[in-house]
Image (cartoon, rainbow, N blue to C red):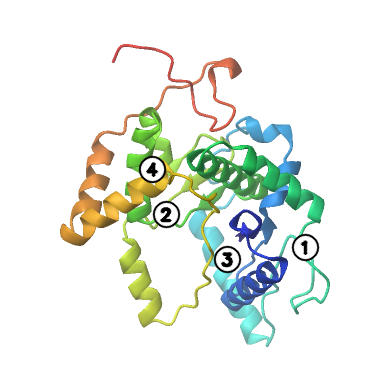
């Protein structure tokens, strides 16, 4: 879980409460989990701005396949359950599973430095892009530090459709394949996949409601007074408004985007790669 309460104008008490709720939810799953704060992006190593060495996708004696790894984990869970013990959970704070009385929030100086970076962004659109970039870099770096080769994102088809039109509005149409596709391999050693993009946000909400899946409400990114909404917000309002009148709007945008998403240009050198998104610079004209 990536805690973003600092840029959502939450008080320290609200951030602690949200963090405790999320930790309780994650502990109930029985899977290993990690809690990180957005402030940690200020200490990311310079290597995050470069793609890591690609890992071999073939399974061998020392590298089990994905199915074998999942089967091994399930078998371990069953053995732990039969012996009367539960699988220990893991967090970045290395704290015990029981709630700790000590503050788990970053230092106030780090929070203020992060807020200054966001306030320096001139528009709401720039802040949205900054948040997305820091979020991606933090998740990828956490996966690298802990040896994960794949990261599953929870982007629904609704979110993918919004991102597709937003990218077109921001002039990032050349990178639709990596920003909205099922797989994103721009980071080299860590592959980002989006397995939830076949389901709409409403379908996921109904599933959570009928099956009693607990949820944690996180406020959106802060906006300044009398500030124009971001392009992300405008596109979201536009699409969701059309979706109410025409229920096939989201799926139509998504399917159209799949057909209009060519592979982005490959960067032949570091100077031809964007340091923020790690995609090849779209500097060549023509087709």
From the viewer's perspective, tell me whether residue 249 is left or right of residue 198. Answer: left
**In the depicted view, which residue is nearer to us: 283 or 75?**
283
From the viewer's perspective, tell me whether residue 84 is left or right of residue 245. Answer: right
- Contact flag, marks 3 and 2 (Cβ < 8 Å): no
Q: Secondary structure at mark 2?
A: loop
Tell me what residue is drawn at x 20 percent, y 52 percent: 249
Query: Can you identify the residue that label 2 sits on?
Result: 155
Query: Can you identify the residue that label 1 sits on?
Result: 93
Q: CA distance from mark 2 to mark 1?
A: 27 Å
How packed mark 2 is, by other alpha carbons closer than 10 Å (few <14, some 14-19, many 20 or more), is: many
Which of discs 3 and 1 lies nearer the camera? The answer is 1
Is tag 4's residue or tag 3's residue first in the polypeptide sequence? 3
Residue 178 % position (x, y): 42, 37
For residue 72, which numbered disc appears in the image?
Answer: 3
**Is any part of residue 181 visible from this angle?**
no
Tell me what residue is drawn at x 52 percent, y 16 percent: 268
Residue 69 % position (x, y): 56, 59
Query: Can you identify the residue that label 4 sits on?
Result: 180
Residue 152 % position (x, y): 50, 54
How packed mark 1 is, by other alpha carbons closer than 10 Å (few <14, some 14-19, many 20 or more), is: few
Residue 138 % position (x, y): 64, 47
**Is any part of residue 217 visible from this angle?**
yes
- Contact flag, marks 4 and 3 (Cβ < 8 Å): no
Q: CA distance from mark 1 to mark 4?
A: 32 Å
């Amino acid at each position: 879980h990536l805690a973003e309460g600092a840029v959502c104008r939450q008080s320290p008490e609200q951030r602690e409460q949200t963090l405790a709720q999320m930790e309780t939810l994650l502990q109930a799953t029985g899977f290993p989990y990690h809690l990180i704060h957005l402030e940690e992006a200020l200490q990311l190593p310079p290597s995050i701005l470069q793609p890591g060495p690609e890992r071999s996708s073939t399974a061998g004696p020392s590298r089990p396949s994905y199915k074998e790894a999942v089967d091994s984990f399930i078998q371990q869970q069953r053995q732990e359950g039969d012996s009367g013990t539960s699988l220990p959970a893991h967090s970045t704070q290395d704290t015990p599973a029981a709630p700790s009385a000590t503050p788990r929030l970053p230092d106030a100086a780090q929070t203020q430095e992060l807020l200054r970076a966001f306030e320096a962004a001139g528009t709401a659109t720039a802040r949205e892009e900054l948040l997305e970039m820091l979020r991606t870099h933090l998740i990828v770096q956490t996966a690298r530090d802990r040896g994960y080769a794949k990261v599953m994102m929870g982007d629904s088809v609704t979110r993918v459709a919004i991102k597709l039109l937003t990218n077109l509005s921001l002039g990032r149409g050349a990178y639709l394949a990596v920003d909205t596709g099922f797989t994103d391999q721009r980071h080299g050693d860590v592959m980002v996949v989006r397995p939830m993009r076949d389901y709409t946000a409403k379908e996921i909400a109904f599933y959570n409601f009928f099956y009693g899946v607990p949820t944690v409400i996180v406020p959106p990114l802060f906006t300044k007074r009398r500030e124009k909404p971001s392009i992300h917000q405008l596109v979201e309002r536009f699409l969701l408004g059309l979706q109410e009148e025409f229920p096939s709007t989201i799926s139509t945008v998504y399917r159209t985007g799949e057909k209009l998403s060519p592979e982005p240009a490959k960067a032949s050198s570091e100077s031809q790669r964007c340091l923020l998104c790690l995609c090849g610079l779209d500097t060549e004209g023509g087709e």
